[in-house]
Structure formats: C-alpha cells, structure tokens
Image (cartoon, rainbow, N blue to C red):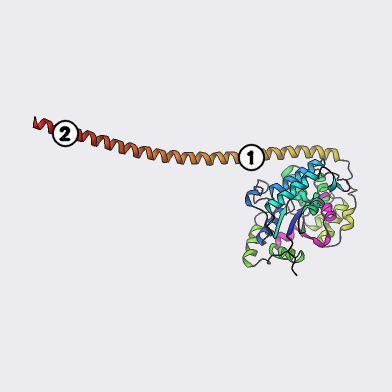
Amino acid sequence: MSDARPVVVCVVGMHRSGTSLLARLLNLAGVDLGENGRLARAADDNPRGFWEHEGLREINEALLTAFGGSWMHPPDLPADWTRDPRAAPLRERARALIASEFADRALWGFKDPRTTLLAEFWREVLPGRSAWIVAVRNPLEVADSLKRRNGFPSVLAEDLWNAYTRAALRQTPVADRAIVHFERLLAEPAAEIQRLIRTLRLPVTPPGADAAIRMREESSRGLRHHSHGLDEVRGSRDLRPGTVELYLRLWNDEDAGALADQPDAGFGRAFTDLRGDFARLVDEQDRMRSTITDREREIEREQREAAEWRDQALQLQGEVSSLKRRTEYWMGEGLRRAWRRLRGRAAHS
C-alpha cells in the first residue's frame, strides 16, 4: 500500500553552502517551494535567487529572536525548548501558514539555513513525512564567502560552520536524512538529485535528459567564487582539529554523529559577547538592506503606476485632439452653412 501522507523536503545547512542551488534543483525535479510571489527576491550576494519562502523564514527569524539569538548568533536553546511558552504562538503561526499555503500539496519543500538550528521545532510542526537534506561545504570556502559578503573574521565563520553542521546532525533523524556536498552538487547536479530522490524515497520521477541539461545550466554559472581542496583543509593552520575531523568524516561518508554531540572545545565561548555584538551590527546591516529592498519595490510600483497614468494621459490627449478636430470641423461647417444662407438672401434681395 502506498504512503498517502504528504512529503516535506527540508533543505538545511550552513549559510553559503549551496542551499539555494540545492533548493532550485529540487524545484526543477518537482518539489513545490510555494507561490513565486512568496519566495524571497534575488539580491546582489545571490543573484540567481534564494528560493526561500518568506513566511517560513520570518517564523525562523522570530524563533531565534525569541530565544535571544539570530542566524549569526545561535542561541543556547534549553532542553525541551520547543515546549517553552515563547515557541507556542510561532508554532500556531507555522501550522496556520502551512495549512493555508501547502495543505493540498502531496510533495513540497522549503529551504532556509536557519531551520538547521530549529529542526526540532519543525519536526513537530510539519505534516506527513519530512525528508532532511543537509548541505555541506568546505569550511575554508564558507569562511571566504562570509568574509566577502559580511566581513566576518575567519574564527567566527568557523564557529558558525560548526554550530550549523553539528546542529544538523543532532536534530535530524539519520533514517530521513541525506548529506550533499556543494562540490559534488556543482560537478554532477542531476546525479546528486537522483541520489537524493532514491535515498529519501521522494515521490518524483528522476530527472530526464531535458531536466539534467537545465540543472547543469543552473549549477554552472559562476556559483563558486572560492575554492579550497581537501589537502588545504588537512594542512590548515587556521582551522581547529575538531573542524577538520568533522569535515573529513562527512566528505568520506563516515559516521560523524559522535562528533556532533561533542562541544566545540577548541573555540570555547571566549568570543560569545563579541560575536553577539558583531551579530547585532550585521543584523542592522541586513535590516538596512531590507529597507532598501522595500523602497526599491515601492519605487518600482510607483513607476508602474506612473507609466499607467502616462498611458491614460496619452489616451485622453488623443481623445481631446480627436474631439477638438471634430468640434472645429462642425464649427467650420456651421459657419459655411450660415455664409451660404447669407449669400442666398443677398442674391434675392
């Protein structure tokens, strides 16, 4: 008997690890990500689109804020935190959103790196069966990307890489999880998507030739600005031993569960306060970017309205000109008739 429950595909992983590309490729394979109008718009740092549902992302942001953190300052969540009163209204909000936008979908998914830190919450909220895909990228490349985009120091980027990667391994069930490496996704996108479909038993047809070509196009347009090999990770003097071991185990498809449960002792919490201050500064930067984006949307709307008014004005101008010509013609015709009558009377007088 077939499983009639809906299937929800959750793309998680550290920021700058290819989660956007992964979500887009799954979308091409048949995973519904929601209405286009609800997906976050592209930005300078991700010109091909984020493929994030804005409503679900906002819930994640509200959850992190409620527990005193943000995406770059993961909060220390207490035991049984999903039962905390702070989570209750957001749980109801999440269920209402899913019911209103995805209730009739047999297969749908969403991507947001923040979900990595909050997977326990979503495992309680999501209907049906959830399948978890963890995107992993070389920590040196993640550090380079975050430095380029946000100005992050390498030590902060590494700490976040550990926090997200370990949270993904702790909070997602092994039986419903698959790991995807950014480098392999770029090299063989269709093959990786086919592997995910098979491993996670997703109810979609594996990509055919046309889909494979489209996936290749999506994954070959300058998406990798930073490149570091395995030897660089092994010999890095910047990465902590725990980071190196965790990444190499994941790359070699070895069990990394024990590492995920261990604290990241090499870093400790010495920079916690500094990280929080830095996070608040970047949050402010993100809010300013959001304000700019909102203003750009408002300008676009005003420009569209101005164009519509301009078209209406041109139409009215044409109608006025036409009316003016008709008026002048009839006035002229009236004068000509009056002149003819006067001439007729003069001829008979």
Q: Residue furthest bottom?
A: 1
Query: Which sits in the foreground, 160 or 39?
Result: 39
Q: At which x and y percent is residue 192? A: 72, 63
Few, some or many residues within 10 Å of mark 1 (<14, 14–19, 20+): few
Q: Tell me the amino acid under the disc marked 1.
A: Asp
Query: Which sits in the foreground, 101 or 245?
Result: 101
- How far is the residue under mark 1 from the one under mark 2? 69 Å
Residue 225 visible in the picture? no
**Labels 1 and 2: the sequence-earlier one:** 1
Picture residue at 72% right of the left edge, 53% below the top: 111
Q: Tell me the amino acid under the disc marked 2.
A: Arg
Q: At which x and y percent is residue 184? A: 74, 61
Which element type, helix, strand or loop, lies under badge 1? helix
Few, some or many residues within 10 Å of mark 2 (<14, 14–19, 20+): few
Picture residue at 71% right of the left edge, 61% below the top: 187
Query: Which sits in the foreground, 144 or 210?
Result: 210
Q: Are marks 1 and 2 in contact (CB under 8 Å)?
A: no
Q: Main secondary structure of the magenta part?
A: helix
- Region of the chain picked out in magenta, as a range: 163-187
112, above or below 320, in the image? below
Picture residue at 41% right of the left edge, 39% below the top: 316
Q: Which mark is residue 341?
A: 2
Instruction: Return the residue at label 1.
Output: 294
Left or right of residue 86, residue 103 in this image? left
Instruction: Residue 211: say if magenta.
Output: no
Task: Give the number of the mark in front: 1 or 2.
Answer: 2
Instruction: Residue 168: say if magenta.
Output: yes
Could you tell me which quadrant the C terminus lies in? top left
Q: At which x and y percent is residue 131? A: 77, 59
